[in-house]
Image: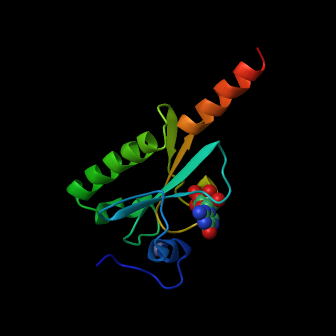
Amino acid sequence: MPTQRDDCLFCGIVRDGTYVNQTKGFIAINDINPQAPVHLLVIPEHHVDSFREIGEFSARESKHLLEFIADTARSVGLTDYKVQVNVGPTAGQTVFHLHWHVLGEGGAASKTDAMATAVSEL
Ligand code: 5GP
Ligand code: ZN
């Protein structure tokens, strides 16, 4: 079983079970305060405070995580996007359970919306 903390917001979200995407050991959710049209958070089920503790994951888990980030972006229709980790408060980390931000301008749905707008403006 992954290590969980009762007082941790993201451990609670892991336990809630409502995800955009899921794989063994990792989940993806929508950010509650998106900084881009698509803003996902990829979160390990195992609690570590920050990226500084990445060594607690095996090489296999780390590879699986990186593939899951790419799969999750693809699954919401993103081809171009940013992947970001804030490490420590002065670098912008506000939730102390390791997570990756996936930020993109829009997936399949927003492309369809943009095309609909463009067509309606013809
Ligand atoms: P950080 O600032 O630690 O790199 O990122 C934390 C992120 O978690 C922020 O982008 C913030 O909007 C998001 N966040 C904070 N609380 C919640 C929550 O309760 N639910 C979700 N889905 N995202 C949250
Ligand atoms: Zn946690």
- Image check: 33 left or right of 83? right
Quadrant of the drawing holding the N terminus:
bottom left
**x and y, in percent, of residue 52 in the image:** 41, 60
- Image check: 96 left or right of 46? right
Depth order, front residue of 87/103: 103
Residue furthest out toward the bottom = 6
Residue 47 vertical position relative to residue 88 in the rendered view, above or below = below
**x and y, in percent, of residue 32 in the image:** 65, 60
- Image check: 79 left or right of 32? left
Residue at 68 percent across and 27 percent down: it is 116
Residue 74 vertical position relative to residue 90 in the rendered view, above or below = above
Residue furthest out toward the top = 122
Depth order, front residue of 20/26: 20
Quadrant of the drawing holding the C terminus:
top right
Residue 121 can be seen, yes or no? yes
Q: How many marks?
A: 0
Residue at 45 percent across and 77 percent down: it is 15
Residue 93 can be seen, yes or no? no
**x and y, in percent, of residue 107 in the image:** 54, 37
Residue 96 vertical position relative to residue 68 in the rendered view, above or below = below
**x and y, in percent, of residue 66 in the image:** 34, 47
Q: How was the colour assigned to the protein in this rendering?
A: rainbow
Residue at 49 percent across and 75 percent down: it is 16
